[in-house]
Amino acid sequence: MIRFPDIRLVFLRELRGALRERSIVINVVLVPLFMYPILLWMVYTGLSFVIGQTENFTARVMIAGDTEAGGALVQKIKAADRVTITTVDTPRDAIRDGRLDLLVELAPRDGGYADDFEVRFTGDSSKDRSRIATSRVEDLVTRHRTAYLEAAGRNRGLSGPEYQMIWIERENISSERDMGRFILGMAVPVLVIIMVIVGGMYPALDATAGERERSTWETTLTAATDRVNVLAGKYLYVAALSTTAGLLNFAAMSLSMRTLMAPLLGDRLESVAFTIPWASVPLIVVVTVLLALFVSALLMIVASFARTFKDAQSLAGPFVTVMILVPAVFMQFPGLELTTWLACVPIINVCLVFREAIGGVYQWPQIGLTLLMEGLYIWIVLRLASAITRYEDIMTGSYEGGLTGFLKHRLLRRTS
Amino acid sequence: MAEPVFVKDLTKTYYDESRGPVHAVRQIGFDCRPGEIFGLLGANGAGKTTTLRMLTTILKPTAGTAKIMGYDVAEEPVEVRRRLGFYSATTALYPRLSARETIEFFARINGYPASGTPARVDELIERFGIGEYARTRIDKLSSGMKQKVAIARTVAHDPPILVFDEPTVGLDVLNALEMQGILAELKAQGKTILFSTHIMSEAEKLCDRIAIIHEGRILACGTLESLRERTGAHYLEDVFVSCITEVS
C-alpha cells in the first residue's frame, strides 16, 4: 500500500545523506553550475586562439609556368598580405609533406586573346593551411579578373552600373534575440541532457548498489512499510537530484552564455542577445523532469544488478554513453526539427523540444506527442522495475547474473 | 492473545545458479512465549539466518507458516515488521546520518507516533549513553558506538518482539558482554527475544529455551535442562554434538 508519509521519510533520508556526500554534491550542484560553463569558456577561448593563429599564418605559394602571361596577377600575388612566394624542386611532394601550401601554374590559352590565360591551383584539401592558401589566392584571382572586366567594360563605353547588371543585397531579418536563441539552442539542450544523466547517475548507483555495498540495504528492508514506498522514495530522490542538476546547468548556461561566447564572437557579440522566452520555462522544466524520471528509473534498474558501486559503474557505463552520445551526435545534424517520428524517439525528442522552446517555437501536436511518449517510456521502465523487484534474489542482492541474463532467462521465459 | 512467534513447517528453498536448488530450511517448527529469550543454536550455514530473515520478512518462505503476534509473515509483512525489531551483525547503519537521525528515522518509518518521537529518541539516547555523539555522523563512530546506535534503532519503535541475528559476532569481549547485558535488560522489560548464535556459552547463559538447528532442520528444542535430560550430556557443547551425532 502506498503511504506518502513513508515515501517522504525515505526521500528525505536519502536526500540528507546525499547532501553530506561530497561526490554527489559535486556531480549534482557544482559540476552543472560551474564546470560546464568554465569548460566551455576554455574551449571557446582556445578555439578562437587557434582560429586566429590559422587565419594569420603566411601561406607558402609557388608560382610556376608562363609567368609572363599573367604578369599583373603574379605581381598582385607577390604583393599580397600573408603570402610568401617560394620555389621547390618537386612541388607536389612538398605539398604532401606540408613544406608548401599551394602551387599556382599559369599557362596561355589557345584563343587568340592576348590576356587570356589559365590558372591551375594544386593543393591538398586535407590540410587546413593548403585550403586557406588556395582560398586566399583564388580570391586574389577573382578580384583581378573583376578589375580586368570592369576596365574592359569601361573601354567599350559601359558604365559601372551597366556592367554590374545584377546587384545582390543581403538582409538578415533575425533579431539580436533570435541570433542569441539560435546559439543557445545549439549548445544548451545537449549539455542539459548530459547533466540530467550525469546528475542522476551517482545518486542512482549510490541508492541501490552503494547501499548494498555498505550493507544497509537489509536494514532498509526491515522498515515497517511496503517496499514500494521505499523504492518510490529512492526513485523520487534520484529523479529530484537529476532534475536539479539539469535545471541548474540550464540556468548557469543561459546566464553565462554571453561571457562564454565572447572569445568566439568577438565584435559580433554586440549583435546577439542571449535571452530565453519566459513562456518556455514551464515547458523546459516539464521535459527535464520527464527525462529525469526516465533516466533515473533506467539507471536504478541497471544498478540493481550490481553488488558494489564499482560494479554498478561498469554496468551503467555503456547505457550512459549511449544516452549521451546519441543525442549529442543527432543534434549536430543541421535543420533537424521535431517531427512526429522524432517525437517518439526517447531523449532526442526532449532535446528537440528543449531546443525549439529556447527558440520560442511551439509545435504543440509534436510537443504533446513527446510528453505522451516520454510518459509511456517511464511507465514501461517502471513496469520493468516492478517485475524485477518481485524477484527476491535481486532485492536481497544474491542474484549473480546481469540484466541481459535476467531478461533472457526470467522475464522472457516467463512471458513465453 | 496470539503467540509472539509461531513457526510451523517453515521451509526455504532457493535456486543457486551454480548449485541448483538449495534447501536452506526444511519444515522447521517452534514457538516463542511472551517475555522469553529463545535461542537458535547452530553452526555456520545451519539455516539460522535464513530462518530469521523469513521471520523478519526479508525473505519469503517457500512453504509453511510463520506468524508474529498472529500476523503471517508472507501475507502481512508490514504488520509483522511493525511489531518486531531486527538486529544483525551483518546489517549496517546509514553512514551519512547522525545517531539521532538514524534512531528518529526508524522510529518514524516503523510507525512510532510523530508527536512522541523526539521524546522517544531522547530516552534511547539517554538509555544507551549515546548523548556525546548523538549528532556525529555514523561513519565517524567506533564499532562499539555503532553497536549501541544499532540496538537503539532496533528498539526505536518499541516493538514487543526483537530478533537478534548473531549479535556478538565481531565484537570484543567487553562489547559482547555489554550486548548480553542489554538482551537481559530487554527481556526484563517484557520483550520476547529470538536470538541466533553459534556461541554455546552465550546460548547457555541467556536463553530460556534453545532450538538446535542443523542443515536446515531443528534437531531438538527445549530448556537447557530438558536438552540435558534428553541427551544425557551436561554442557551445551556436548548436548549440541550429541544431537548432531544422533541424526548422522
Image: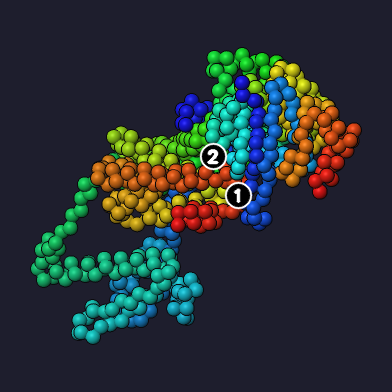
Secondary structure beneath dot 2 equals helix
Q: On screen, A263 above or below A166? A: above
Secondary structure beneath dot 1 equals loop
List x then y, in percent, for residue A68. 31, 79
| Front-lying residue, B29 or B96 | B29
| Front-lying residue, A415 or A259 | A415
Density class for disc 1 (Cα within 10 Å; few <14, some 14-19, many ≥20) is: some
List x then y, in percent, for residue A315. 56, 52
Under mark 1, the amino acid is Tyr
Mark 1 vs 2, N-terminal side: 2
Real-space CA distance between mark 1 and mark 2, rounded to the nearest whole angstrom: 22 Å
A117 on left or right of B119: left
Under mark 2, the amino acid is Pro
Q: Residue at x 17, y 58 (%)?
A: A168
Image quadrant containing the N terminus of chain B: top right
Q: Which residue lies furthest to the front in this view?
A: B230
Q: Mark 1 points at which residue?
A: A399
The disc placed on residue A203 is 2
Q: Which residue is drawn at 70% across and 24% down?
A: B33
